[in-house]
Image (cartoon, rainbow, N blue to C red):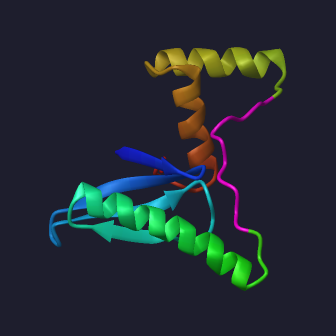
Amino acid sequence: MNYLTYKGYTAVMEYDAEDRLLVGRLSGIKDRVIFHGESVAEFERNFHESVDGYIESCAHFGKDPEKPVSGRLMLRVPPHVHCAALAAAKASGQSLNQWAAVALLNAAGQTTTA
């Protein structure tokens, strides 16, 4: 997947082969903000307009726009949990960060990282 950023928001971009469009959404917030474009330039322009529109819409309704999450998560766990997680990550051929991301997604009932 490819990513663009604007005003601290991240766009996740995918190609829709059926409609021949670049389809995007804001990542890292619960609100759904979706946009598309037939070219990279149009996609990027629509992404910027969507972010600006999202911020303006929130202001209009007296709501604070969600701030995107950073992707950094500090956890404190007992040493034996840390050791077991490292062993599981190594056994799966992943880094601890990769393994933990999958484990957290599974625990949250999700199957995608975006």
Q: Does the magenta segment cover residue 85?
A: no
Q: Position of residue 52 (x, y in %)?
A: 55, 68
Q: Quadrant of residue 39?
A: bottom left
* Residue 23 placement (x, y as % from top left): 32, 64
2 displayed left or right of 61: left
Question: In the rendered image of this protein, does residue 14 appear above or below residue 106?
Answer: below
Identify the magenta region. Answer: 65-75
- Residue sitting at x 32%, y 68%: 36
Which residue is nearer to you in this view: 58 or 96? 58
Q: How many marks?
A: 0
- Say above or below: 70 vs 13: above
| Residue 94 appears left or right of 16 | right
Q: Quadrant of the N terminus?
A: top left
Q: Position of residue 84 (x, y in %)?
A: 67, 19
Q: Measuring from the top left, give residue 96's x and y in whole percent.
A: 58, 22
- Judge left or right: residue 34 versus residue 30: left
What residue do we see at 64% from left, 76% from top? 56
> In the picture, residue 89 is in which quadrant?
top right
Residue at x-position 57% and y-position 47%: 105
Kindly report the secondary structure that dominates the magenta region of the rendered protein: loop
Q: Is residue 67 magenta?
A: yes
Residue in the foreground of this view, choosing between 5 and 79: 5
Q: Which residue is found at the position 84% from the left and 21% from the top? A: 78
Task: Tell me: 12 left or right of 14.
Answer: right
In the picture, residue 34 is in which quadrant?
bottom left
Indicate whether 50 appears above or below 1: below
